[in-house]
Amino acid sequence: MSVALVTSPVFAPRGAAPPPSPRRLRVGMPHLDVAGLSENWLFRHAGELQWEAIGQRLGVPSDEIRGDAGARLYPTVVAVRARYDAPLAAVRENDVLDSQVEVVPCGRSCAHGRIVVTNGQHRFTLELLTTFAARGPHGLRTAPLAPALARRWTAPDGPLPVIARLARAARRGEPVDDPFAGVALARASQPLGSITYEPSPYADYNGAGLLYFASYVTIADSAERRLVRQLGLGGTPRDWALATSTVRRDVYYYENLPLGASLVASLYQLDRDRHGVSTHVRLSRAEDGRPMADVIARRHFTAELR
């Protein structure tokens, strides 16, 4: 069977040591969107830190991570759980962000990472579950590391991380025992609305020709904004992108999308209270309807920040 499937960006240049963790940067326009800190950038930043940590543990750059048959392996994202102490809209230009990463093996082919980005008193925490996968005639498939690399990839004793158990249940269509994502996934029946979208090769795909894991979130948010307007669900005269800001996000990845193909983004949930909204968007392949990802978010109304 095919596994959850998005690939990583390029590791550090050959022979160059990546910057050590922790890392500090000053927020500029590349890190922002119209409302504050860009979640697309934050996901990409977390992914970069995770890939570097994996490569450091294995002692090789990403293009030298190989399977037991010599084929290149790609670190692919299976699930992300993001928890933000403050809405992303709280981050402003010239703020300073400090980032730390901790990655440990969880099985022969998986990595469990925790990336913490701090902005003064605010903490933005992302938990990533990734697996090594090789290209095959029918897409990517989980694959074991080559023996020399596998010896450097030993998982500690103990139970699987919670995110691994939740991702397995979501991928199998089983009940997800989680008060946030589990409730949303259990309610999925008929969508409130759907739109079709062809991702851009210039912005949504990476150098390996695969739909990048951070793009799933941006596509889901863009579709959600459009559907909120079309269906009259916003309840506010302000633009959805300015009226709300993310404080929590879970993404479960199932499939990638060939370049040139289209997907369908369906809004399954939009629950509103006085503080914000909870939403669930599912991305599926337009050609065959195969689910690509479930994207569950909690947003706060940004008026509370002003």
Image: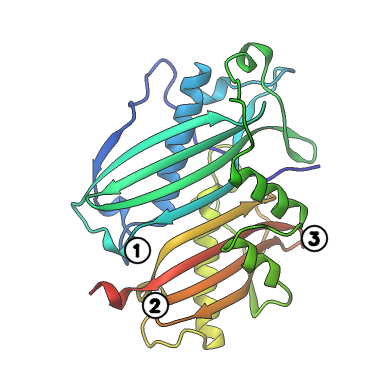
Horizontally, is 302 left or right of 191 in the view?
left
Q: Judge depth for marks 3 and 2 and give the one in front.
A: 2
Residue nearest the viewer, comparing 99 with 273: 273
Query: In the rendered image of this protein, does residue 112 appear above or below residue 71?
Result: below
Of the residues under marks 1 and 3, which one precedes in the sequence?
A: 1
Quarter of the rendering occupied by the N terminus = top right
Residue nearest the viewer, comparing 269 with 74: 269
Q: Amino acid at mark 2?
A: His
Residue nearest the viewer, comparing 199 with 21: 21
Residue 164 locus on image (x, y percent): 63, 43
Task: Bin the neighbour count of mark 2 within 10 Å (Cα to Cα): few under 14, some 14-19, many 20 and up.
Answer: few
Task: Bin the neighbour count of mark 3 within 10 Å (Cα to Cα): few under 14, some 14-19, many 20 and up.
Answer: few
Q: Which residue is mark 3?
A: 288
The CA distance from mark 1 to mark 3 is: 36 Å
Residue 24 locus on image (x, y percent): 25, 38
The CA distance from mark 2 to mark 1 is: 12 Å
Q: Which residue is mark 1?
A: 87
Q: Judge depth for marks 1 and 3 and give the one in front.
A: 1
Residue nearest the viewer, comparing 149 with 256: 149
Query: In the rendered image of this protein, does residue 299 appear above or below residue 164?
Result: below
Residue 177 locus on image (x, y percent): 66, 57
